Image (cartoon, rainbow, N blue to C red):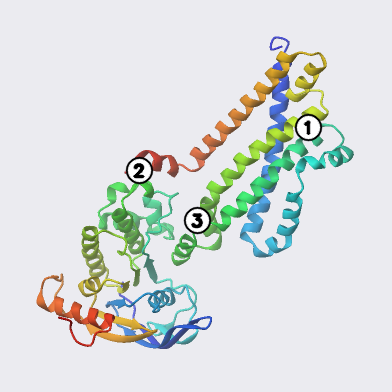
Amino acid sequence: MKGVRLQLRRLTHRYGERVVLRDLDLEVTSGEFLAVIGRSGTGKTTLLRLLAGLEMVQEGELLQDGAPIRGLNRRARMMFQDSRLLPWERVARNVGLGLPRDRADRVAWALERVGLADRAGDWPTILSGGQRQRVALARALALDPALLLLDEPLGALDALTRIEMQSLVEATWQESRSTAVLVTHDVEEAVTLADRVIVLEHGQVSLQRTIDLARPRLRDSPAFATLAQDILDHLLGRTCPSI
Amino acid sequence: MTASGELPINVAVSARRAVVGLLLGGGLGLTLGMLNGLSGRSERLLDTTIQMARAVPHLALIPLIILWLGIGETAKVSLVALGVVFPLYINTLHGLRSVDPGLIELGRVHGLGQLELIRRIVLPGALPSILVGVRYGLGLMWLGLIVAETISADSGIGYMAMNAREFLQADVVVLSILLYAALGKGADAATRFLERWLMPWRPVEAANQP
């Protein structure tokens, strides 16, 4: 399956009086990995929820492969910061959540893919944080979604697990050729994974950087460091690099 | 007493009243709780009334029960049921309310229908709270039963105790109290078993937590 193309035109979203997204224009090409960075409360999560169809478009246009998203976006799967596994269902059942009966074989495939094939019969409560997120990733991948939405999925993990998970996310995304939108606070993570990084500020795109480094990316390369620093400076509101 | 068959019969009669009352009252409380927990309209319609009825101590209804239902089995079972209804109602409602909204959202993202959402996410999420209701209900079940059997009965543990009082048989009175204790303990053990059976993910958590 090929990733979806997304077009956002003058998208405005309000919660009551508060404007969360303001005249947002954005295009995401098929198979692109887009990272969205921004401080808390800048509309990142709202953007993801709109893409998932959890929020209704209020103003403007949101097109997926040229057609507006009506109701729930059935081609999208979302991964949350907390793994949100159902504690009362075993790992395999969790991964198969919402999967049509005839696609049950995908459960084993997805668990295999994240390296947890041997934990299929376990309760989620006995897994470590990293393993839970891997199960959550498997669940998101099971249906082979054309749009993968990642809401700070690695935010709560320790540094090592995080790096492992990043390579896993990158590998599975490349394999599936789906479109991915990642919301994160971590500039390095964004530069590691994304084809393009945007910074949201006051509901608008305030910075856009295409990352054309070869994959897998090395964090210690000068080009990587320059890009990351550039984005970080922008986030911190500095105009010139600090000494 | 055991040899004469008096004891086993009285215990069996009491246990039967307790269980029937529990099932009736518990079933009603559970049903109402689910109805109001899942449907806003039903809640607006019924919740205030139920809360009002809840404020009345159920033992205060004894005169009315005797007037309407007499002093037969129906009256006794009703008294037990009345005690069990409200803890189950409240806890079911609370359980349904406190299901993690994140999990419900997850279910929606994964395209679960309304029924499947309830079956796979809402009900299991509410289950711990419902079982707390069952345990509360059990306490009130014995209370209702004792009162019912003490007021008027010709069989059951309460009757046995009241009868013994007439004949100054303190040992039988004490035995009756111990029997209530044993039955209460048994009921509690049954709930624990129910918990382990309905929520198998829990003990695993306790045993294997890293």
Position in image of residue A18 (x %, y %):
49, 82
Residue to which mark 2 is pinned: B209
Which quadrant of the structure image shows residue B141?
top right
Q: Earlier in the sequence, mark 3 or mark 2?
A: 3
Discs 1 and 3 lie in a common subunit = yes
Query: From this viewpoint, which residue is outermost toward the right?
Result: B67
Residue A185 higher or lower than A85, as above or below = below
Please name which of the two marks, 3 or 2, marks the residue nearer to the observer: 2
Q: Earlier in the sequence, mark 1 or mark 2?
A: 1
Position in image of residue A233 (x %, y %):
23, 81
Tell me how far mark 1 sits from mark 2, CA to CA. 46 Å
In this rendered view, identify the residue nearer to me: A111 or A132.
A132
Residue to which mark 1 is pinned: B148
Position in image of residue A31 (x %, y %):
27, 77
Chain letter of the residue carrying label 1: B
Q: Which mark is residue B121?
A: 3
Tell me how far mark 3 sits from mark 2, CA to CA. 23 Å
Q: Badge 1: few (under 14), some or many (20 or more) residues near its Cα, within 10 Å? A: many
Query: From this viewpoint, which residue is outermost toward the top?
Result: B3
Q: Residue at x 53, y 54 (%)?
A: B119
Secondary element at image label 1? helix
Q: Amino acid at mark 2?
A: Gln
